[in-house]
Amino acid sequence: MPRLLAAFLTCVASAVLATGAAFGIVAALNVTPEQQNVPLVTFPDPPANGTSSTPSPSAG
C-alpha cells in the first residue's frame, strides 16, 4: 500500500508541476513586448505609367 500511495503522490506532484510550468511559460511570453513589424527589405514603387526604363530580357 505505501508504494501505491507514493506512486499516486508522485503522479499528482508531476501533474501539478507540469501545469505550473505551462502557466509560467505562458505568463512569461505574455510579458514580453511585441516586436515592431518593420520590413527588412523595401522595393521602390513602380512607375505610374507602367513603362520601365530598363530593357526587358529577351526570350532565347
Image: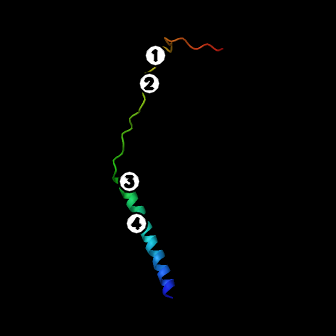
Tag shown at residue 48:
1
**Callout 4–callout 2 Cβ contact below 8 Å:** no
**Callout 4–callout 1 Cβ contact below 8 Å:** no
In percent of the image, x 44 and y 21: which residue is there? 45
Q: Position of residue 10 (x, y in %)?
A: 46, 76
Residue nearer the viewer, 29 or 3: 3
Query: Is 32 on the left-hand or right-hand side of 13?
Result: left
Question: Of callouts 3 and 4, which one flags the residue occurring earlier in the amino acid sequence?
Answer: 4
Q: Residues within 10 Å of mark 4 (few under 14, many from 20)?
A: few
**Callout 2–callout 3 Cβ contact below 8 Å:** no
Question: Of callouts 1 and 2, which one flags the residue occurring earlier in the amino acid sequence?
Answer: 2
How far apart, in angstroms, are the residues tagged by discs 4 and 2? Answer: 47 Å
Q: Under tag 3, what secondary structure?
A: helix
Reading the image, the residue beneath label 3 is: 29
In percent of the image, x 50 and y 84: which residue is there? 3
Q: Under tag 2, what secondary structure?
A: loop
Task: Name the residue type under label 1.
Answer: Ala
The image quadrant of residue 56 is top right
How far apart, in angstroms, are the residues tagged by discs 3 and 4? Answer: 14 Å
Reading the image, the residue beneath label 4 is: 20
